[in-house]
Amino acid sequence: GESVGLHLPTLSVQEGDNSIINCAYSNSASDYFIWYKQESGKGPQFIIDIRSNMDKRQGQRVTVLLNKTVKHLSLQIAATQPGDSAVYFCAENRNDYKLSFGAGTTVTVRA
Amino acid sequence: DADVTQTPRNRITKTGKRIMLECSQTKGHDRMYWYRQDPGLGLRLIYYSFDVKDINKGEISDGYSVSRQAQAKFSLSLESAIPNQTALYFCATSGQEGTDTQYFGPGTRLTVL
């Protein structure tokens, strides 16, 4: 079936290094993608989004890359900090205002 | 996000009890959603509403019902709670301006014994 999935359930990164979190999707009709960050005990928090007519979008310390050819989405976090430790979810929208979420990648930042 | 609030934040109940979870938002959004989150899984959509007169089932609506009392309020009910409904429940909203971005509340941790 069609789904959104993250390649790795966990990622350990040294403080100061760059993090890359990957996500694969299978629905070619998806036209909007979002990355969320969920800290312990909190709800998912919007990080950055990208529409299917773009292949790259940058925010503050974060960059989202979209490769529609291979249906791949990634989130890059520059100079990872301890506060970046969280679970990261990708979500896709198929133009019906409902989101389909991946299972999440837990990022742990090592001091 | 303080603009989306959920009550209660934690609840422990017994099998067979009726439970209501409430969500309020001050973002002025038309669209509201209820999700559940289980360990190791992503968020799964239970119900959603695009305005006060609109209620739609999500992918896992069995055992749940909802009420959209006003634009700002969307409640989720478990008519007869069972242990496999133990989960984190999140409410979310999205804007009428056409953006698909959803904004989440802090969640309710529900335990059914």
Image (cartoon, rainbow, N blue to C red):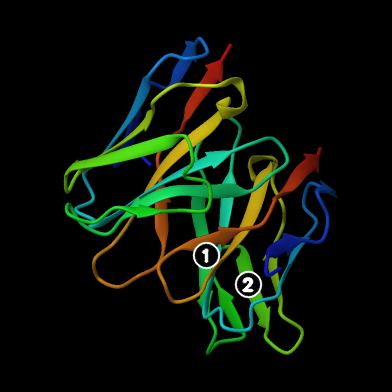
SS at circle 2 = strand
Q: Secondary structure at mark 1?
A: strand
User: What residue lies at 40% left-to-right and 51% top-to-bottom?
Assistant: B103
Residue denoted by label 2: A64
Quadrant for residue B49, please give it: bottom left
The answer to whether the residue labelled 1 contacts the one labelled 2, judged by CB atoms less than 8 Å apart, is yes
B22 sits to left or right of A40: left
**Amino acid type, label 2:** Val
Of residue A14 and residue B30, the one placed in the foreground of this image is B30
- Specify the amino acid type for callout 1: Ile
- Residue A86 visible in image: yes
Q: Residue B96 at what x, y percent from top left?
A: 24, 66
**Viewer can see residue B2:** no
Return the mark for residue A48.
1
Please tell me whether residue B78 is drawn above or below residue B90 in the rendered image.
Answer: above
Where is B39 relative to B20, above or below?
A: below
